[in-house]
Structure formats: C-alpha cells, structure tokens
Amino acid sequence: DYKSRVTVVGSGNWGSVAAKLIASNTLKLNSFRDEVKMWVFEETLQSGEKLTDVINRTNENVKYLPGIKLGKNVIADPDLENAVKDADMLVFVTPHQFMEGICKRLVGKVREDAEAISLIKGMEVKMEGPCMISTLISEQLGINCSVLMGANIANEIAVEKFSEATIGYRDKREIAEQWNVVAIAAGFVDGLDMGNNTKAAIMRIGLKEMIAFSKLLFSSVRDSTFFESCGVADVITTCLGGRNRKVAEAFAKNGGKRSFDELEAEMLQGQKLQGVSTAREVYEVLSHRGWLELFPLFATVHDLCRSSSTIRHS
Ligand code: NAD
Ligand code: 13P
C-alpha cells in the first residue's frame, strides 16, 4: 500500500514542535511512512558541530527547542531540494521573510500533486499589494496550500499542553492571518508597567484593527474567523506569553535605547520576531493607501519600533 511522505520545511521553535507532533502521528497512522524529513537552515553551533548532525545524533533541536525529543523518525536534512523531492505533504514553517527565497528555490522541485500547509505568520508585501504566505506558496509552486494558525505558543505545545488551532483551506474560504503587531503593543504596555486594564484595551483595539485591515484588503474575510483560535485566542496568548511581547517589554523598559535587533539577538538566540517586520510591512500598506489615520495602533507600533534606530543613530 502507498504511504504518504511528509516534509517539514523549517526547524525553528515552532517548526521543531510541528515536526515532533507530525512524527508521533505518522508512527500511529498506517497511511503514512514513519520517517518525517525536516529541512534545516544549516548552521554551525558554538561547539563547532553542524546543527543537522546534532539533531540527527540526539533527536533534539538543541538550539531552537532544547530539552525536547523530536522522535527518532524525524530526519534533519540541510539540502532543501532533497528534503522536499518526494513529499506528498509539505508543512511550511519558517519565519515569513525567508519564504519568497525558499519558494523560488523550490519551483519545479516539488511533486505536482503535493499538498501544502503553512504555519507561518505575517505576509509578503509586494508592489501590487500584500500577499498571504499561503498564496505565495500556492502561486509559486502550483500546489494547494492550507493554513494552520491559532493560540499556539510552541514551547507549551512541545510539552503537550492542550491547545487548539484553526485550519483555513481553499474550498471553504477562511482567512487565518494573524499579526504579532498587537503583541508588541502589549509588550510596550508591560514594559511601561501600565497594568491590565491598559493591556486589555490594547488587545481590544488591536483585534478591531486586525478585523478592519483584513476586510479592507480581502473582501471575503468573515467576522466569525476572528472568533476562532486564529483570531481572538491567538491575540490573547501572544499578548500574554509570546516572544514578541517579551522583547517589546524589554525595549520599553530600556526606553527604546536598545534596538529590537539587539534585543532579539540577545534574548532569543536565533529565534526570529515577526512583529517588527510585519509592523513595517503593514505601515507601508497603510501609508501607500492613505489609511494611516484609520489604524492608530498599527501605525504607532511601527513608529515606536523604528524610533530606536533614530535614537541610536542620532
Ligand atoms: P524561530 O524564530 O524559532 O527560528 C528562526 C528559524 O529561521 C531557524 O530555524 C533558523 O535556522 C531559520 N533561519 C535563519 N536564517 C534563515 C534564512 N536565511 N533562511 C531560512 N531560514 C533561516 O522559528 P519558528 O518559531 O519556527 O517560526 C516560524 C513561523 O512560525 C513564524 O512565522 C512564527 O511567527 C510562526 N509561529 C511561531 C510560534 C512559536 O511559538 N514559536 C507559534 C505559532 C506560529
Ligand atoms: P511569538 O512569536 O510572539 O512568540 O508568538 C507565538 C505565536 O505566534 C503563538 O501563536
């Protein structure tokens, strides 16, 4: 009997958790091959060893998900083309800024009947307007691409705490776009010690702006989507527990004197924030379309994020 092959493209904090969960499922399901390939953006660790070799030797992503066994059937592969070539199912989970380059490298290299799913937040801003990452994948690779998003802090799922997610797919059109921009605003509130009332207000306004922004850009968006895990629940968890919130808190505590780039490198050791670049991308769309006044929270988050570079260079 034919057995489907799954490849995970990406191996950061969330990518590693996705590979672990998928690999535990493929072991249980007869219709899947046990082995799950995970493409790793290769890097050399401080010990001098390649990350891929360490993952394959220890079954652990010691840099992005330390302390968690991924399962022996997760095979790390630094060769992107080789990792995807026979896959029936492709799970994309890299920081969004790398996806355009990855898609370009994958044109003509994936099976024509492969099914993809994106676990990626953020969007790609092009001259002709913003493009969802799932659309980028679908259009560049000529395959169907669904989306999974939700209140999903990776480290909690890694230790198998309960969590739910929303899946968006083409036939029953759902939009599952979530921007960590609001989590950065929540982090500022924490850093300035402004209290829970203010933080709740930020979450409310943030969600309102997300709904308005999504509807202006994509007319098929439904209100109900924002009451799913990928909407309100994700706003809450990222504003309470996420990495964007944490680094934004440190940024505000330092009065903007240290940049997000510096704090990200120091606090996250290679993990990537989506909020700062997404705030910039959203801002570009807002200013290009003359919508800045309609979105004070989004616009202010970007102004504050970039204020550090002004402070540093002046
Ligand atoms: P991460 O931020 O933990 O790690 C960064 C990853 O990017 C590493 O695998 C690194 O090797 C890779 N990388 C660095 N430079 C690269 C390059 N030039 N090209 C390709 N890859 C490169 O990653 P993550 O947490 O797995 O995030 C992936 C996506 O999942 C993001 O969109 C994120 O918002 C989303 N997400 C994350 C979480 C979470 O809790 N971590 C939860 C839900 C969604
Ligand atoms: P952070 O990237 O801010 O940790 O958010 C994680 C997340 O997206 C949870 O759904």
Image (cartoon, helix red, strand yellow):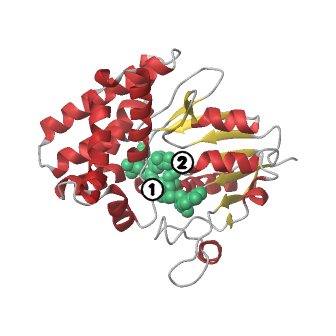
Closer to the camera, 280 or 195?
Answer: 280
- Please say whether residue 9 is visible from this viewpoint: yes
Q: Which residue shows up at 47% across the image and 17% down it?
A: 222
Q: Residues within 10 Å of mark 2 (few under 14, many from 20)?
A: some
Q: Which residue is mark 2?
A: 97
Q: Is residue 126 above or below residue 45?
A: above
Closer to the camera, 177 or 33?
Answer: 177
At numbered mark 1, what does the secondary structure look like: helix, strand or loop? loop
Answer left or right for 13 relative to 244.
right
The quadrant holding residue 15 is bottom right
Q: Which residue shows up at 25% across the image and 42% down it?
A: 186
Q: Residue furthest bottom?
A: 47
The image shows residue 96 at horizontal and vertical percentages of 53, 46
- Residues at circles 1 and 2 in contact by the CB criterion of under 8 Å: yes
The image shows residue 230 at horizontal and vertical percentages of 44, 34
Q: Residue furthest top?
A: 219
Residue 128: which numbered mark, if any? none
Q: Is residue 165 above or below residue 213?
A: below
Q: Residues within 10 Å of mark 1 (few under 14, many from 20)?
A: some
Q: Which residue is mark 1?
A: 272
Q: Which residue shows up at 49% across the image and 18% down it?
A: 221
The residues tagged by marks 1 and 2 sit, at their Cα atoms, a distance apart of: 10 Å
Q: Nearer the viewer, mark 1 or mark 2?
A: 2
